[in-house]
Image: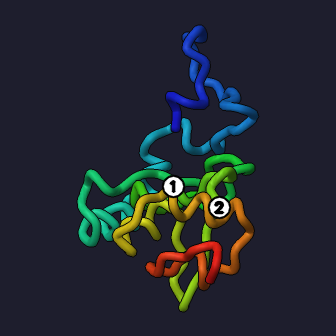
Amino acid sequence: MKARCLRPDTEHVDRKSYNGIMFEDRWVEFLNFKEDMYEKYLQHVEEYGEKETTLDRVDGSKGYSKANCRWATRAEQTNNRKNVKLYTFKGKTMNLKQWANELGMHRSVLASRVEKDWPIEKILSNERFYRNK
């Protein structure tokens, strides 16, 4: 977070911009960040492991703050990007790569079905579809 937000050419600690994103003033001091986020960090690590625990902004257009940050897995963080399209089917929400893995299909097959504007039931079907069907 700090590495993204602090300009490397300044010697003093100051809130700077990462694509217009800032972090809250009290987090300049690590102990304040730890006070706000450490308990949730430990809970997340317990469930997902340290390698799958990353700091994520709930709303990517807002800055780093206690109200806007959470600990997330890499997959959750990927899905939180504004350019990732999520598809919900039978109560499950995933991106195309995740759906492809779930269904044992190539992502490109699903992507081509999306481009053809097929309904979600047909996009996520394992059936082979032919023109004359």
Residue 15 is drawn in which quadrant? Answer: top right
Query: Where is residue 126 shown, x and y percent of the image?
Result: 44, 79
> Where is 103 relative to 35, above or below?
below
Classify 10 Å Cα crowding around label 2: few (below 14), some (14-19), many (20 and above): few
> Where is 25 relative to 34, above or below?
above
Which quarter of the rendering shows the C terminus? bottom right
Q: Which mark is residue 100?
A: none
In the rendered image, is residue 102 in sight? yes
Q: Which of the pair 89/130 is nearer the observer?
A: 130
Q: Give the secondary structure at mark 2.
A: loop
Return the residue found at the far bottom.
90
Measuring 37% from the left and 66% from the top, which residue is drawn there?
101
Q: Which residue carries the number 2 mark?
A: 85
Q: Amino acid at mark 2?
A: Lys
Between the residue at mark 1 and the residue at mark 2, the CA separation in whole angstroms equals 14 Å
Measuring 28% from the left and 66% from the top, which residue is drawn there?
48
Q: Which mark is residue 108?
A: 1
Query: Where is residue 120 shown, x and y percent of the image?
Result: 64, 80
Measuring 60% from the left and 44% from the top, which residue is drawn there?
26
> Where is 62 relative to 25, above or below?
below
Classify 10 Å Cα crowding around label 1: few (below 14), some (14-19), many (20 and above): few
Q: Are marks 1 and 2 in contact (CB under 8 Å)?
A: no
Residue 123 is drawn in which quadrant? Answer: bottom right
Q: Which of the pair 93/24 is nearer the observer?
A: 93
Q: Amino acid at mark 1?
A: Ser
Return the residue found at the far front.
132
Q: Which of the pair 61/130 is nearer the observer?
A: 130
Measuring 51% from the left and 61% from the top, which residue is drawn there?
109
Q: Which of the pair 68/60 is nearer the observer?
A: 60
Query: Where is residue 89 shown, x and y percent of the image?
Result: 57, 84
